[in-house]
Amino acid sequence: MVAVLLGALWVAMDVAGWPEVALAQEVAGSITKIEGSAQLIRGGQSLALAVGTAVDVGDKVTTAAKAQVRLTLRDGSILTLGESGTIVIDHMISATGTAPSVIRLLGGHLRSIVAAALRGTIASFEIHTPNAVAGVRGTRFDTAFIEGTPCPGFPKCLRYTDVGVSEGIVEVTNPTNPSAPGVLVEAGYETTVPCEEPPTSPGPLGMGEMGGPGYH
């Protein structure tokens, strides 16, 4: 009898706990376009992505070779992750706007189109790579994180971040070197962040290269 009662209590607690788990999940957006094979990793489980799949804060999205995924965030911003890429949705800006939306790019090429409501607001939207932070003050920009390939101009550096801006202004810093000055990258320009070095002075944008398939 005791075992039966304990079993019933366990079931009741388990069922009652589901709404709390659901409430703890914060939807960041959904998949609005997909080409090729892509995966969503949540709680250690891997799921195949499809148009309409909801993406939560904390989820990781990965793309295979020759694949591309478009994620429309709940604030209207659009992220397009190119082939062999990985992003993690770390945080979404709240109604009070006390902390920025943070998207972590762990590899590959990510194109970001920031929602109109967030444009011109300092620290409202950030793309983080292992050695760079791109803080948005503009609207449309590309970020690429490359590892295992020599950085142009810095042959001993095997990991670097490129940030190219097509509209607005993006502030770029290197969090691995807090004393290094950041740079403001205006439309039509790009910067490279090599290893622990400060971002390079912005130069003319090579959008044909950064925007192309398989950018590396």
Image (spheres, rainbow, N blue to C red):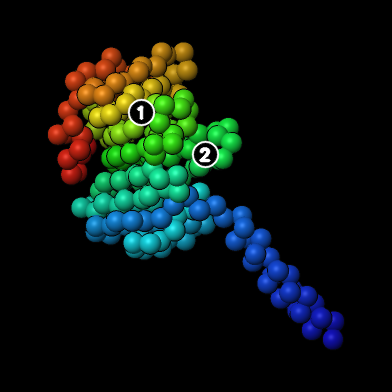
Mark pair 1, 2: CA separation: 16 Å
Residue kind at label 2, given as amino acid type: Ile
Badge 2, how many Cα within 10 Å: few under 14, some, many 20+?
some
Above or below residue 178? Residue 74 is below
Residue kind at label 1, given as amino acid type: Gly
Q: Secondary structure at mark 1?
A: loop
Residue indicated by mark 1: 138
Q: Quadrant of residue 48?
A: bottom left
Q: Nearer the viewer, residue 213 or 146?
A: 213
Residue indicated by mark 2: 93
- On the image, the x and y values in percent for residue 72 come to 38, 49
Residue at horizontal 40%, vertical 31%?
119
Q: Earlier in the sequence, mark 1 or mark 2?
A: 2
Q: Secondary structure at mark 2?
A: loop
Q: Report the side of 130 relative to 142 (left or right).
A: right
Confirm whether residue 104 shows in the render. no
Q: Quadrant of residue 112?
A: top left
Above or below residue 119? Residue 38 is below
Badge 1, how many Cα within 10 Å: few under 14, some, many 20+?
many
Where is the N terminus found, in terms of image quarters? bottom right
Residue at horizontal 25%, vertical 29%?
166
Q: Report the side of 186 relative to 213 (left or right).
A: right
Q: Quadrant of residue 168?
A: top left
